[in-house]
Amino acid sequence: MKDYIYDNNNSWIVLDIIEQIHLNSSYLSEIDGATGDGDHGVNMDKGFMLAKEKIPLDSNFTEALKILGRTLVMDIGGSMGPIYGTFFSKLSRTLKSKEEIDKYLFLDALKNANQGLLDLAGAKVGDKTLIDTLYPAILSYENAINNNLTFYQCLYEMKQGAKSGMESTKDMVAKIGRASRLGERSKGYLDAGATSCFIILDTMANSIQKELAK
Amino acid sequence: MQRIINNPNLVVEDMLKGYEKSHSDIIHSDENNPRVIISNSVKEKKKVGIITGGGSGHEPAFLGYCGRNMVDAVAVGEIFSSPTAKSFYDCIRAVDQGMGVACLYGNYAGDNMNVKMAIELAEDDEIEVKTVVANDDVASAPKNEIDKRRGVAGEIFMWKVGGAKSNMGATLDEVIKTTQKAINNTRSIGVGLSPCTIPANGKPNFMIEPGTMEFGIGHHGEPGISVKKLSTAKDIASNMVEIIYNDSLFENGDEVSVLISGLGSTPLMEQYILFDEVAKILEEKNITIYKAYIGNYFTSLEMNGLTLTIMKLDEELKECLDMPVDTVGFK
C-alpha cells in the first residue's frame, strides 16, 4: 500500500464528498430544524451541487477543492458559505504545494483549515459547532502520526475522532450562531454543522483510503 | 401550507423579478448579479455609499429601504439566510464614489462573516468600508453581553439616519459616528403569537401554543425570554415598554421616535391598538413621541406578532429623521 496519494486526477475524492452531502441533505435539514431554521441540508446541497457542475471529472484533487471552496463563498451565503468555503480553500492552498500528498502535508492542511475557521467565525471547542467535530478529528489524526501509524491508519483514527466529536455536540449548549439563542433548550440535539462536518471528513478519509489501497 | 408561489426553492428569485418590475422608478438590479438591488439615484451626487443586506422573508426589509436619501444598494440572501460575500462586495462596488462605503447591517453570525469577506475583497480595490452592526433587540442577550444582541426593526432607524447623514455630505467617519449613535440610542422587543414557515421546508420549525405568546421572539422565530398567556393589548404594551425601559437607556423627559412593525400577519388595526397603549404609557413617563411609524416595516414571513422599537432622539437624529426619502418601504 502507498503512503501518499497524487494530487493529479483525483477530483473524484471531492465529488464523493459532494455526493454524500447530496444524499444526506434531508437528514441535515431535519437535524437543523431542532435548533436552527431547518435549512442546513437544503443550503449545503445547493452549494455543493453547484460546485459539482464546475468540477471537471479528471481534474486535480486540489483544483476540485478550490472550485468547491470558491463556489461556497461566492454563491451560497448564510453561515455555511463562508465557513465551508474557507475550509476547502485552505485545504486546497496547503495541499497543492506538492504533487504527492502524504500524511504530514495532510495534517498541515487540516490545521490551516482549522485556523482559517477560528479566524473567521471565532468558535471554540465546546460551542456546539462544526469545530467540535473538526478539532478532535485533527487531534486523533495527529496522535496517530506521532505513533508512527500509516497514512491509512491515521485516517481511520481521524474518522473515529470526528465521529465522537460530532456525538459530543448532543450534550452541549450552543454558544454561537442561531442555536445559541436557544440556550439550554439546544441540549439533546446534534449540531447540524458538526454533523455535516463529520460527513465531509468521513467521506474524504474513506476516499483517500481507497486511493491509498489502489 | 397555504401559499401563492410557484417553486418553493425559487421564491426569492421570483419575488425579485416582480419587485424590479413594479418599482423600476426607484430601483434596478445589478447587471451581473440579480441578488443586488441598487437605487436609481445612487450616483446623483458624490457622497458616502450606504449599503445593507440580509436574508429574505422580511419584506419590505431589506430591499424596500433602497432609494433616494436612504440605502444605495442592498444584498439579498435566501430566506432567513445571509447574502453571499460576493453580493455584499458587488453592493460596495456599485455605490463607491471614492468617499468610502458604510455597510449598515444586523448582528447575525452569517452576515458578520460574509460582510467581513466582502470587506477583504474591497480592500484589494482600495475601497474603504466601515460598518455599523445593529444590536437593538433587548431580549436577545443581557445588557452585559450587548454585543451579542441581534438587530431587528431598529435597523430601519439606522438606515434612515445613515442615509440622511450621507446625503448631508458627511464623511465616512461622520456617517459611521452618527449611525452608531442612532443604534446605540435604539431598543426593540418582539412578541410572537404564531410561527412562520419557510416555503422550502413546508412546516414551521417552532410552535406557539394557541392562547399563549412568546415574549422577546426574534425575527426568525428565535425563542424569546418567556412564554406568557395571551393577554390584552394594554398588558402587552405595558410589558414591552417595561422590558425596554429596564435596559436603562430612556429617562423621563426624553424625546423619542417609535416604530411598531407587524411581523407579517398581524392586522394593522391591532398595531394601532397597541400603539395607543404604548403612547399612553410613554405619556405617563413624560416621554414625548416626536414621530411614530406603524405598519409592516420588518416582517418574518407570515408570523403573527409585532415588534416595538424606540429611539432616543437629539437634534441631529431628528434632522436625519426629517429628511424626505423616496423608497418603497419608508415615506
Image (spheres, grey):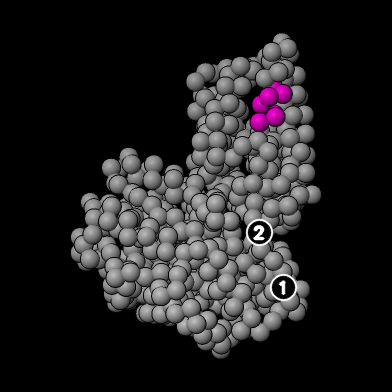
Magenta stretch encompasses residue B257: no
Which range of residues does the magenta coloring cover? Answer: A135-141
Q: Quadrant of the N terminus of chain B?
A: bottom right
Q: Label 1 is found on which chain of the structure?
A: B
Image position, residue B328 (x, y; %): 40, 76
Of A8 and A109, the residue lying toward us: A109
User: Hey, which quadrant is residue B29 in on the image?
Assistant: bottom left
Residue reaching furthest to the top? A148
Image position, residue B304 (x, y; %): 63, 77
Q: Which mark is residue A33?
A: none
Q: Report crowding for label 2: few under 14, some 14 to 19, many 20 or more residues within 10 A (C-alpha).
A: many
Q: Amino acid at mark 1?
A: Lys
Q: Secondary structure at mark 2?
A: loop
Of A153 and A55, the residue lying toward us: A153
Q: Which mark is residue B228?
A: 1
Q: Is any part of residue B190 visible from this angle?
A: yes
Q: Is B66 situated above or below A96?
A: below
Image position, residue A52 (x, y; %): 58, 43
Total labels: the figure holds 2
Whether residue A57 sits left or right of residue B125 in the image: it is: right
Residue at 53% over, 69% down:
B245
Whether residue A89 sits left or right of residue B129 in the image: it is: right
Q: Secondary structure at mark 1?
A: strand
Q: Which residue is mark 2?
A: A37
